[in-house]
Image (tube, helix red, strand yellow):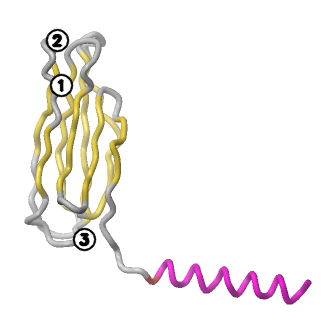
Amino acid sequence: MKNLIRTAVVGFAAASALALAQPASAASFGPVAVGDGTVSYNDGTDSFCAQAYNTEGARWVQVTLVPLSRSGPSPSWTDQNNYYGHSGSSCRSLASAYEDTYYRADIRTYWGERGTVVTRASRYFYS
């Protein structure tokens, strides 16, 4: 039994060391709900997308991307949906950013029926 426990501890320590030793890497995510729409990042195409929901009146999702670890593009845009079926969905490219640049996505949303702008939690990711 002691050997089994010892083996498990050594295995866990080795796996933990390997996981911590990996270099930072970009990771795709989403779409993730942000209240009145979704956001996503596709590492394969280096694109960050926002989409305002196409339901229950006018909505928008506003995104500002801020490079934190080094210089890079910092696009800001608003994806809009309105009562007339313009469902939105717009992306911005981070292809000119250095690989593995750490970004913060600041997100605000609006829903016409609620009538207020809401600041959502920021998303952090590597390009």
Q: Name the one closer to the observer, 106 or 35.
A: 35
User: Up-down: is 33 above or below 56?
Assistant: below
- Residue 40 in the image: state x and y as whole percent: 28, 46
Q: Is residue 22 left or right of residue 55?
A: right
- Residue 31 in the image: state x and y as whole percent: 33, 43
Local crowd size for mark 3, using a 10 Å CA cut-off: few (<14), some (14–19), many (≥20): some
* Segment tinted magenta in the rendering: 1-20
Q: What amino acid is at disc 2?
A: Tyr
Per the model, the C-alpha gap separating discs 3 and 2 is 39 Å
Mark whose residue sits in front, 3 or 2: 2
Quadrant the N terminus occupies: bottom right
Mark 3 touching mark 1, by CB under 8 A?
no
Quadrant the C terminus occupies: bottom left
Our reading of the magenta stretch's main secondary structure is: helix
Q: What amino acid is at disc 1?
A: Ser
Secondary structure beneath dot 1 equals loop
Q: Earlier in the sequence, mark 3 or mark 2?
A: 2
According to the picture, the residue beneath numbered tag 2 turns out to be 83
According to the picture, the residue beneath numbered tag 3 turns out to be 100
According to the picture, the residue beneath numbered tag 1 turns out to be 87
Question: Which picture quadrant has residue 38?
Answer: top left
Which residue is depicted at the point 14% across and 39% down? 90
Local crowd size for mark 1, using a 10 Å CA cut-off: few (<14), some (14–19), many (≥20): some
Question: Which picture quadrant has residue 6?
Answer: bottom right
Mark whose residue sits in front, 3 or 1: 1
Which residue is depicted at the point 15% across and 72% down? 98
Question: Which picture quadrant has residue 66?
Answer: bottom left
Q: Is residue 95 left or right of residue 51?
A: left
User: Up-down: is 1 above or below 64?
Assistant: below
